[in-house]
Image: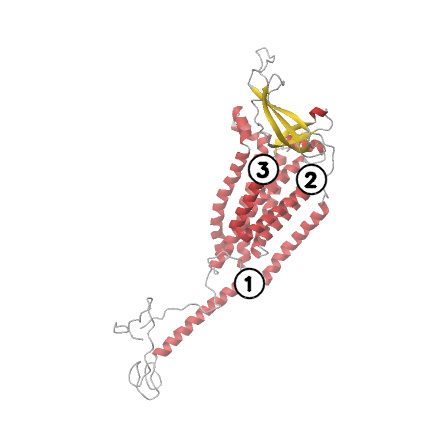
Amino acid sequence: MTHTEPGPPPPGSSHGHSHGHGPAAPVSRHLRKVIAAVLIPFAAAVVVGLLALWPGGAPDHERTGVGFDQQTQQARVTKVEEVDCAAVNAQPEQGQQPPTSGDGSSQAPPDKGNCERAAIQVTTGKDKGRTFPAVVTPDASRHYTTGQKVVVAYAPKAPKELQYSVTDVDRTFPMALLAGLFALAVIAVGRLRGLFALIALAVSFGILILFILPAILQGSNPLLVAVVGGSAIMLIALYMCHGLTARTSVAVVGTLVSLLLIGLLGSLFIGWAQLSGNTDDQTGLVHGLYPGIEIRGLLLAGVIIGSLGVLDDVTVTQTSAVWELKQADPSLGWRQLYVSAMRIGRDHIASVVNTLVLAYAGAALPLLLLFSIARSDVGTVATSEIVAEEIVRTLVGSIGLVASVPVTTLLAALVVSADRTRSKAAGETAGAAALGTGVAAGAGSAGAGAGPTGAGAGAGPTGPPYSPGAPGGPPVPPAAPDERGRPSRGPSGRRRKR
């Protein structure tokens, strides 16, 4: 008995499952209508919110000259020379106090060496070409070199010789170079999708700068502005990066549900912990310039916007996992899909939550060092407002992140299981396979059975059966070559001649 090996599938036939991660398979028209019925009103509400809250620019105010609220110009260091600190009456760097004696009276600072006097030339603005001196003490954290570009602050009401002062160095070139390297890396690895991700990133920053920040400065509710702006960022970023598919739409719905949970928990615990949100100099300056801004709402808005990026990552990953599992095995029900995809989600949760906590710890390292120097216990540090604010921000965002995994996985499993097109295609594939098996079995039975007057294949109506190669019988078919191109062996073990 000979066994026939299955040949390659005919053109146009599909493989049983796919191992690739290409575009999601199309869904039924009914399912598209259901998803559109949920997302179109939501997108329309976001557009209405943008139009209703659009600020039209930040409000004008009189500059105070404090912190970032001061006029700045570009300048360049033209000369640096060493001078005696006593000759130029140099004072210690800001934040350092001269030593005191035992009775509390200040002592003269000890001689710490020579100071540096730099000549700074203004290169922009109405005073372009003007030069002023800047003295740098030996204990200063920043020193200048000839030709270095710096940023200077301009105080128009100060005496002429004190109108300009160096506030920072010019970092335009290294920052632009780093941004270019980042863009090249994203495009080199992500290709077209990486390019769309960069475009979505630019649009997100545009919404943040042109809508969210000016609207808050205009006096709009920070929480409402953050919800509308964050929703717009989510819709644009997800659909631009992942396409207008049912898979992306499920990720959008899962992200929206998680954002609502973060908003509710954040509002509850910020009020319960009595966090004012005014814990640093920048927030105090903003509140002083615009007293109408609700600082506590600003804190909650920061929690929502800060959680948005990580939520997008988790929800897209979970929906993709569910779709790929269903494509690999169309017979899986929604419960099996949910259980399998949750195994992936648990691994994702463990890594992302740890990332959030370590990211805050790294950003707040100087603050934590201050508490360590003060020898404060953990309870005192954790319940102080400046740290408790960040703890609430991190834990609320993490709870929303954890909740997004089962919510998005369940939504994706229900949607992909309810897809009529996919279910119909799976049924047709199974039916075709069964029909092919039945036809093959029937053909084998017919070839092995007896004819009307003779037995075996090749028997004539009245004559005896013939075998291939016998006198009067059919000719011997040509032998198929083996994998080395040589004639295959016949029943006797000898190679057949072509």
Tell me, for residue 393, which label it has, or none.
3
Instruction: Give the image location of residue 356, x and y in percent.
Output: 53, 39
User: Gap between marks 1 and 3, in whole Å?
Assistant: 42 Å
> Which residue is denoted by mark 2 in the rendering?
216
Q: Is residue 9 left or right of residue 398?
A: left
Task: In the rendered view, tell whether residue 304 sits above or below residue 319.
Answer: above
Q: Secondary structure at mark 1?
A: helix
Instruction: Give the image location of residue 329, x and y in percent.
Output: 46, 59
At x 53%, y 55%, the residue is 413
Q: Earlier in the sequence, mark 2 or mark 1?
A: 2
Residue sitting farthest toward the bottom:
462
Residue 69 in view of the camera: no
At x 65%, y 35%, the residue is 296
Q: Is residue 39 left or right of residue 329?
A: right
User: Gap between marks 2 and 3, in whole Å?
Assistant: 19 Å
Tell me, for residue 126, which label it has, or none.
none
For the residues carrying marks 2 and 1, which lies nearer the camera in this image? 2
Instruction: Give the image location of residue 119, x and y in percent.
Output: 63, 26
Task: In the rendered view, tell whether residue 248 sits above or below residue 216.
Answer: below
- Name the quarter where the N terminus is drawn: bottom left
Q: Earlier in the sequence, mark 1 or mark 3?
A: 3
The three-letter amino acid code for the residue at tag 3 is Arg
Q: Earlier in the sequence, mark 2 or mark 3?
A: 2
Q: Secondary structure at mark 2?
A: helix
At x 56%, y 41%, the residue is 177
Residue 76 in view of the camera: yes
Q: Secondary structure at mark 3?
A: helix
The three-letter amino acid code for the residue at tag 1 is Arg
